[in-house]
Image (tube, rainbow, N blue to C red):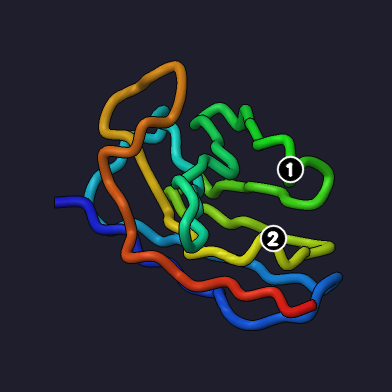
């Protein structure tokens, strides 16, 4: 049984920074992709960033240049460094992992979510 535990959310002013962390328990194969989804009120869930076991990263266009995803393959902990935050980044952020190797992150395992609120 894989569980993902997020931390690091909170309230920040526009232009500020936050760093999210996700520590898994259980077995996630090093090669499998992990990442972050987010869901804002009244909006569809979207993939924010993903990272493969080899370190290849993808970002949604709205966060490119502001967010950085990273990963420690010794324990599959991942981080999301969020800089220059905007009010439209306000959402619940979910740590996600796949159970098998896929071309794109699908999300077989989900964390409970952490709230990020950016005030204007």
Judged left or right of residue 47, residue 109 is left
Front-most of residues 110 and 25:
110
Label 1 and label 2: CA atoms lie apart by 10 Å
Query: Residues at badges 1 and 2 in contact (C-beta under 8 Å)?
Result: yes
Badge 1: residue crowd in 10 Å (few <14, some 14–19, many ≥20): few
The label shown at residue 88 is: 2
**Residue behind mark 1:** 62
Which is more foreground, mark 1 or mark 2?
Answer: 2
- Tell me the quadrant of the picture where the C terminus can be found: bottom right
Q: Is residue 56 left or right of residue 64?
A: left
Q: Residue, x 41% and y 61% (percent of image)?
A: 23
Towards the viewer: 113 or 72: 113
Counting from the top left corner in percent of width and height, residue 4 is at 32, 58
The quadrant holding residue 87 is bottom right
Q: Residue at x 58, y 57 (%)?
A: 79
In the image, residue 74 sits, relative to residue 50, either above or below, namely below
Q: Looking at the picture, tell me which residue is in the foreground, 55 or 92.
A: 92
Q: x, y percentage for residue 105? A: 43, 30
Q: Is residue 6 above or below residue 29?
A: below
Residue 62 screen position, x and y as percent = 74, 43
**Residue at left 50%, top 73%?**
115
């Amino acid at each position: 049984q894989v569980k993902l535990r997020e931390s690091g959310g909170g309230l920040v002013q526009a232009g500020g920074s936050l760093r999210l962390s996700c520590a898994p328990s259980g077995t996630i194969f090093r090669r499998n992709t992990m990442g972050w989804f987010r869901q804002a009120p009244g909006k569809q869930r979207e993939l924010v960033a993903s990272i493969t076991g080899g370190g290849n990263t993808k970002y949604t266009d709205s966060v490119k240049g502001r967010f950085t995803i990273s990963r420690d393959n010794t324990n599959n902990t991942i981080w999301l460094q969020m800089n220059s935050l905007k009010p439209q980044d306000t959402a619940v952020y979910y740590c996600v992992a796949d159970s098998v190797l896929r071309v794109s992150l699908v999300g077989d395992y989900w964390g409970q979510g952490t709230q990020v609120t950016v005030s204007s």
